[in-house]
Amino acid sequence: MKTASNPSDILADTTNFLPFNLSLREFEIAEIIAYDDLTNQEIGDKLFISKYTVDTHMQNIRKKTGAKRKVGVTMKIREALKLKEWK
């Protein structure tokens, strides 16, 4: 079993398994979008971050997934999770 001397090493290893090279926070937000019908404000409230931070993450998520709208993110994330074939 591999052990890491630094907890951030473990975190770095897990990010390689996220779809579309999303950060952990971007993936968390994308997953919420894919399975919960929440506004950016509601997502921010749920994660204790600003709506504007969610807006920025959404821009990054759309750019990385190639989706133009929130519904496109939903479709791509659901498909990636279902197929587990991530770019």
Image: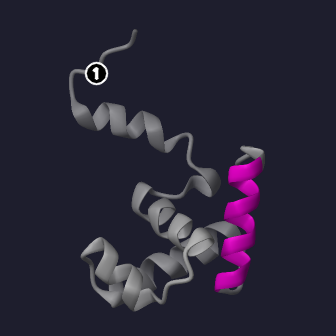
At x 72%, y 54%, the residue is 80
In which quarter of the view is residue 84 placed?
A: top right
Residue 87 appears in the picture as rendered: no
At x 47%, y 44%, the residue is 15
Query: Height in image: 23 above or below 44?
Result: above
Residue 55 in the image: state x and y as whole percent: 44, 86
Query: Height in image: 51 above or below 23?
Result: below
Relative depth, front residue between 13 and 79:
79
Question: What amino acid is found at the position of numbered circle 1 in the picture?
Answer: Ala
Q: How many marks?
A: 1
Residue 2 in the image: state x and y as whole percent: 38, 13
Residue 34 in the image: state x and y as whole percent: 62, 70
Query: Height in image: 47 above or below 40?
Result: above
Residue 23 in the image: state x and y as whole percent: 45, 57
- Secondary element under disc 1, as helix, strand or loop, is loop
Magenta segment range? 70-82
Q: Give the residue at mark 1.
A: 4
